[in-house]
Amino acid sequence: MSARIDLHLHTTASDGTLSPAELLALVAENGIGLMAVTDHDTLAGYRELAAMGTGGVRLLCGIEWSARWSGGEVHVVGLGMNPDDAVLHERVACQQALRPERASRIADRLAKCGIADALAGAAAIADGGSIGRVHFARYLVQCGAVHSEDEAFRRYLGDGARAHVRCEWPMLDAIAGWTHDAGGVAVLAHPMKYRLTRTKLAMLLDEFANAGGDAVEWPLFPAGQQKDTQRWLAKQLHSRGLQVSLGSDFHGQDSRWNRPGKVAQSLPEGLEPVWTRWLPVDGVPSP
Ligand code: AMP
Ligand code: MN
Ligand code: MN
Ligand code: MN
């Protein structure tokens, strides 16, 4: 792979800690030629950067959709949509409307756990950006209820924890359709993060492929590790005709997150990259 790419990046428009301009500076510093801003359920970060101009870095319109699957939540990265598509706007607005509603339910649960004012606290931290659990986690650290964001997820916000609420996100197949309707490609984000058994993950891949899903993010496996899992996953993608995408899921310069461009440096044989459609023939991204 000659060109450096990163097709999964967050900004302050959702739960990232860098503004779009700060993110671009870091992306350029890391030698990335093709990037996508993929904030949770919003195009605001992408828009800000597109309006600003990205110099030598080619920018794709992106989003990380929250979707419902089998009683849980999965993430679908939409790439290359037409940002001026009116229907896409309506759908993003619907998705956005679910967040404040979920936030107030999370705050009610936290209040029952003796933690007051969490809605106002999280909203202040989100500072006009799309409100999410990370903002609650930061508030819980700020007010001294927990020592770390990780503890906040473990004790309160994570799946099955005391202040976890189920959100009525659209179903996986609807989200894939929304992405296609706007001219984009649908990528299943971070497949290993859902902690599914192989049987369950195979079911998810089946449903995603049947819904027209185009690609799956290839994880950054620790060097030389989980070879068996890598072989298994490659076979699953290959047999379903799914392509692969690469993204760091960068949220900020804190040690929990990989820096922009920190993605797998090679793909298993036989898997097709999703990004060649945005590259000129010589494989180098152009602005
Ligand atoms: P939301 O979109 O509001 O449901 O929040 C999901 C986000 O929470 C993910 O994109 C991560 O940024 C973050 N997250 C999930 N689990 C953890 C965790 N254990 N520690 C810190 N952040 C987490
Ligand atoms: Mn996030
Ligand atoms: Mn995600
Ligand atoms: Mn993400």
Image (cartoon, rainbow, N blue to C red):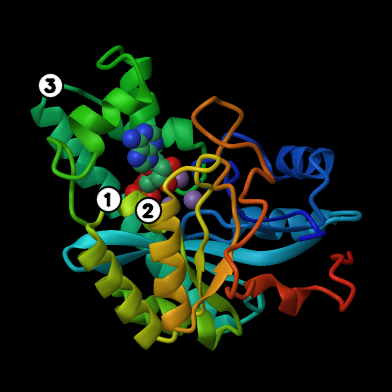
> Which mark identifies residue 192?
2
Secondary structure found at label 2: helix
Locate residue 171 relative to residue 255 in the image: left or right.
left
Q: Quadrant of the C terminus?
A: bottom right
**Horizontal and vertical percent for residue 259?**
64, 37
**Horizontal and vertical percent for residue 70?**
19, 68
> Which mark identifies residue 195?
1
Q: Amino acid at mark 3?
A: Gly
Distance of label 2 from label 3 (alpha carbons):
34 Å
Res 132 visible: no
Question: Toward the viewer: 260 or 44?
Answer: 260
Q: Is residue 201 above or below residue 146?
A: below
Locate residue 187 relative to residue 114 in the image: left or right.
right
Res 268 visible: yes
N-term mark: 2 or 3: 3
Q: Are marks 2 and 1 in contact (CB under 8 Å)?
A: yes
> Which mark identifies residue 220?
none
Q: Residue at x 14, y 37 (%)?
A: 109
* Residue bearing mark 3: 114
N-term mark: 1 or 3: 3
Q: Amino acid at mark 1?
A: Arg
Q: Quadrant of the N terminus?
A: bottom right
**Horizontal and vertical percent for residue 220?**
53, 48
